[in-house]
Amino acid sequence: MIYLDNAATTPVFPSAAAAAMDAMTENYGNPSSIHKAGQAAKKVLYDARKTLVPLARGFSAENIILTSGGTEANNLAVAGVLKGKIRQGGSVFLSATEHASVTEAVKEFSKYFNIVFFEPDRGGHITAKEIESKLTKDAVFVSLMLVNNETGVINDIDSIKPALKRLGADAVVHSDCVAAFGKVALPSTADVDLISVSGHKINAMKGVGALYVKCGVKLKPIIFGGGQQNAMRSGTENVPAAASLAAAAKELFADFDGVKARYEALYDKARKLLESLDFVRINTSEPSSKAVLNVSVPGIPSEVMVRFLQDKDIFVSPASACSSNKGGGSAVLAAMRLPDELRKSAVRISFGRQNEESDVDALYAAIKEAAAHFRICEAK
């Protein structure tokens, strides 16, 4: 199997699976229990937060909230801030290319706030110019993903805080870094106040994520109950998932530069090969994470191409896994104003640590074969 859908999810590292198994079978106490077994489990949670701290400068372990994944982390960031600012009102800013877990959460507050969207340029980037032209003094919340999950492009999040400062706006800044996690450096507290990440994007198990919270940022909880995690996320903590996340993060970031170089080599080779085919259109522009390459083969619908490649034991996706379940095409590519023929034929190729350059060669050959099979061109 050649798995090139790593932006959807990744295979679990053996070390991450082993850490989860240990927490389930050996270190299985309830972290809220005061006895030795409970305190041992509680230490696993604290060690997991400590492991995440160095990945984003300025945040502390005590202010990292462990969640069920990126969606919950994004929901908590949006709702946690906006619930506390309803009386204040004002404007909320986000990009037209955000993940639905941000966009849909913001829509829940549309009767209380003015919602403004940053529009991408033709390459899909949210630029400093666009950000500066849209922000207003009454801004209370800004959310902008660092890396787009469908195209891999990098947005200018470091321009938000300076623009807010010039306006005199006191807004909380959030970044969905789920697609950036493990691919590019996470932002620091100088750039953002909240960061969302997800474990299954970096070879941890599914069902675990985290929300980094800058000291002093006030959130309202969205889950109520026993008061765990400083009453910000009630419910008995998922210790096995936290252990899995910590193990994967340790292994990944022990050789972060090497991992980045691997992605870059795979990306550069794939881009070069596919650009050589006159029937392929590249939808990813630079700067990008080098972990995702979005391409179109006009004349072959996305789902048809995905199934054709699947028959060759090669796995890619039409867009994000979440978007694919909804149908109706990619909102990201629509926001980029791509022609219908490119949107309807787009596929996302995403690289993982297990991939080899031979996987790229096989993908290239299979796409050429698909074009010949569907008479898009003659096979070369």
Image (cartoon, rainbow, N blue to C red):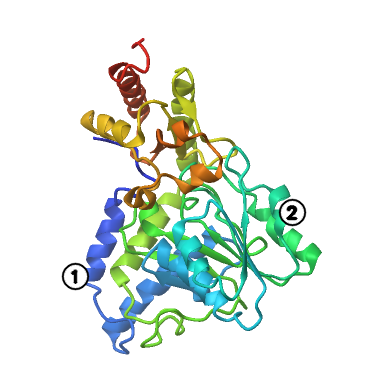
Which amino acid, mark 1?
Thr
Kindly indicate whether the residue at mark 1 contacts the one at mark 2 (C-beta within 8 angstroms).
no
224 sits left or right of 94 in the view: left
Q: Which residue is drawn at 71% across and 60% down?
A: 135
Kind of element beneath mark 1: helix
Identify residue for label 2. 133
Q: Residue at x 37, y 14 (%)?
A: 377
Which amino acid, mark 2?
Ser
* Residue 144 on image: x %, y %: 58, 57
Kind of element beneath mark 2: helix
217 sits left or right of 306 in the view: right
Looking at the figure, which quarter contains the C terminus?
Answer: top left
Residue 25, disc: 1
* Front residue (pair 205, 345): 345
Indicate the quadrant where residue 301 lies.
Answer: top left
* Residue 194 on image: x %, y %: 56, 67
Residue 113, disc: none
Residue 289 can be seen in this image: yes
Give above or below for 233 relative to 314: below
Q: Which residue is drawn at 44% across and 20% down?
A: 279
Residue 50 can be seen in this image: no
57 sits left or right of 29 in the view: right
Indicate the quadrant where residue 259 lies.
Answer: top left
